[in-house]
Image (cartoon, rainbow, N blue to C red):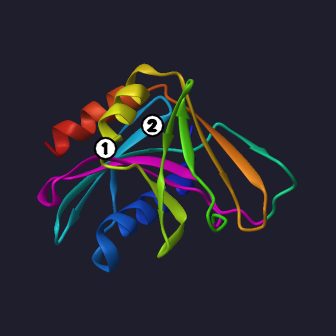
Amino acid sequence: MMKPRTLAIAAAMIVGLSAGAAAQSATNIGTFKDWSTFTSDDPGGKICFVASQPTGSKYSKTISGRDPAFLQITSIPTKTIRNEVSTILGFTVAPNADVTITVDTTPFKMFLDASHPDTAWSTPDTEAALVDAMKHGHTLTVSSASKRGTTVADTYSLAGVTAAIDKMTKECP
């Protein structure tokens, strides 16, 4: 379960990544087991997202100074963004490293943007399948490598993700 202070930081980070410098603060509109749903009224339109934090992490070597990690699904109706999955890894990803989300046993490759070296996004052609897998899955693992050469695998519980997505869909149809 996410801590309230960490959750507030996550909401600010997620809205900031989604909406740019003009982002407003996000409001938690529901917590569903391991997932929470947020909304933000931004000048560019309403933003809705669900977010969670890892329930466990494995490292190939000791890691220090890592920022909090989050996984989120975002919808911004005015920008025709629906169910965009992204993850804030909490570290800078190594150049040319892959970021992979695995739901139970099904892998999905994410893409990186050099302007946000600690964040990866789903590809438009896999978003629907990824969200569907999340709704029907039990666990999700985000795997990558840091610029320092540490391999990292964060595990997320999918308990409550369907209810959180349903709430988001009602708020941002």
Residue depicted at x 65% and y 43%: 154
Outermost residue to the front: 96
Q: Give the residue at x 18% y 43%.
A: 171
> N-terminal of the two: label 2 or label 1?
2
- Real-space Cα separation, disc 2 to disc 1, in angstroms: 24 Å
**Looking at the rendered structure, which numbered label has been put on residue 140?**
none
Examine the rendered structure and indicate whether residue 17 appears above or below residue 35: below
Say whether marks 2 and 1 touch (CB < 8 Å): no
Which of the 4 image quarters holds residue 118? bottom right
Residue type of the residue flagged with mark 1:
Asp
Q: Which image quadrant: the N terminus?
A: top right
6 horizontally vs 83: left or right = right
Q: Is residue 81 above or below residue 147?
A: above
Observer-nearest of 37 and 151: 151
Q: Position of residue 74 (x, y in %)?
A: 32, 50
Query: Closer to the camera, 148 or 154?
Result: 148
Provide residue 143's location: percent of width, then percent of height. Answer: 64, 45
Left or right: 106 as drawn, with respect to 16: right
What residue is shown with label 1?
125
Mark 2 or 1, closer to the camera: 1
Which corner quadrant holds the C terminus? top left
The image shows residue 88 at horizontal and vertical percentages of 53, 57
Task: Classify mark 1: helix, strand or loop.
Answer: loop
| Residue at x-position 57% and y-position 24% | 105
Specify the segment rendered in magenta.
65-92
| Disc on res. 35 | 2
